[in-house]
Amino acid sequence: MKNVFLLILLSSITSCSSHYSSLEDSGRSYGYSEMQIETDIYSLFYQGSGTNTLEEVEKYWFLRASELCNKEFEIIEKYQAPLHGKVSIFINGIRTNIKTKRPRINGRIKCSK
């Protein structure tokens, strides 16, 4: 059942993977980042762009977990950590601050052997 879910998830991502990239390698403000904690345990982070939904970011997080662990992993913990900020724009000649929220998912996974 888990493998079927992963196959469906991976196939749904391939059609909209333009925002899927490494945060470090892309030079962009969105993407994944991971740190190997132990031989089979990773801390995994995915930050979306301003146009990504939380659901898209979660799909990308699962995709990276699948890549790291050859599609077999257990979630130790996973939580949302949105990045709050603001942008300043002019509306009808008046500078207006608009609050923004970029979806982020943090967590730890353990690769199955």
Image (tube, rainbow, N blue to C red):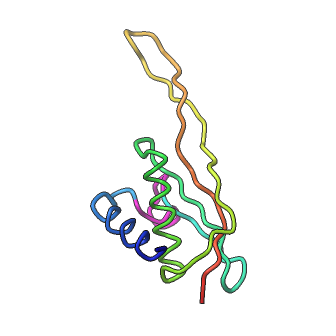
Q: Is residue 29 magenta?
A: yes
Using the image, determine if residue 26 lies above or below residue 92: below
- Main SS, magenta region, reads loop
Position of the C terminus, as image quadrant, is bottom right
Which of the 4 image quarters holds residue 21?
A: bottom left
In this image, 25 relative to 44: left or right? Answer: left
Q: Is residue 86 magenta?
A: no
Residue in the foreground of this view, choosing between 79 and 43 = 79
Q: Residue furthest right?
A: 38
Percent x, y for residue 54?
49, 47
Q: Residue at x 43, y 52 (%)?
A: 56
Using the image, determine if residue 14 lies above or below residue 83: below
Q: Residue at x 37, y 69 (%)?
A: 10
Percent x, y for residue 26?
44, 62
In this image, 18 relative to 63: left or right? Answer: left
Q: Which residues are magenta?
A: 20-30
Percent x, y for residue 106?
63, 58
Q: Residue at x 62, y 49 (%)?
A: 80
Q: Residue furthest left?
A: 15
Residue in the foreground of this view, choosing between 68 and 83 = 68
Q: Residue furthest front?
A: 1
